[in-house]
Amino acid sequence: MTLSVKDVRKITNQDELIRIVKTSDDKYVRRACARNILDEDTLIGIALSDTSGGVRKAAVKRITDKQALEHIALNDAVHAVRRACVVKIEDENVLVDVARNDSNHWVRQLAWQKID
């Protein structure tokens, strides 16, 4: 059975959401799952490995682990994912690194704004 985003939004069972996010081919369904998953380790795994930048960004928005956010901010290929991390990062050294070295103007600009 194929699940829609609407179907996934109704699911509250965390184990079911985790199963779906790991097995679905539909990036929109995976993103809906990531928006509702509570387990930090699962969210970090999604943010580090999902093939869709939108799914990774949804996971990043729920992550609180500072080291994971810093790693993703410095290494993700998609600027929107890196930017979502920078919004949550407070370590000035990491922000300076991003501000000096990120390939995207908007990510660099946000990092500089947070430093000032």
Image (cartoon, grey):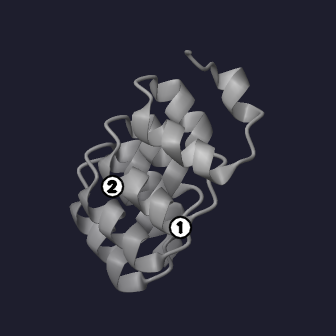
Residue at 59% over, 40% down: 33
Location of residue 6 in the rendering, given as x and y in whole percent from the top left corner: 72, 22
Q: Quadrant of the N terminus?
A: top right
The mark found on residue 48 in the picture is 2
Left or right of 50? Residue 77 is left
Mark seen at residue 40: 1
Identify which residue, 21 or 93, lies in the foreground.
21
Sequence-wise, which precedes: disc 1 or disc 2?
Answer: 1
In the image, 100 versus 48, the foreground residue is: 48
Given the image, on which type of amino acid does mark 1 rest? Glu
Rendered view: 95 above or below 17: below
- Against 83, is 1 above or below? above
Q: Residue at x 64, y 24 (%)?
A: 5
How far apart are labels 1 and 2 at the CA level?
Answer: 12 Å
Point 31% across, 69% down: residue: 71
Q: Are marks 1 and 2 in contact (CB under 8 Å)?
A: no
Q: Is residue 85 left or right of residue 2?
A: left
Element under disc 2: helix
The amino acid sitting under disc 2 is Leu
Q: Answer with left or right where residue 94 lies relative to residue 101.
A: right
With respect to residue 94, does 8 lie above or below? above
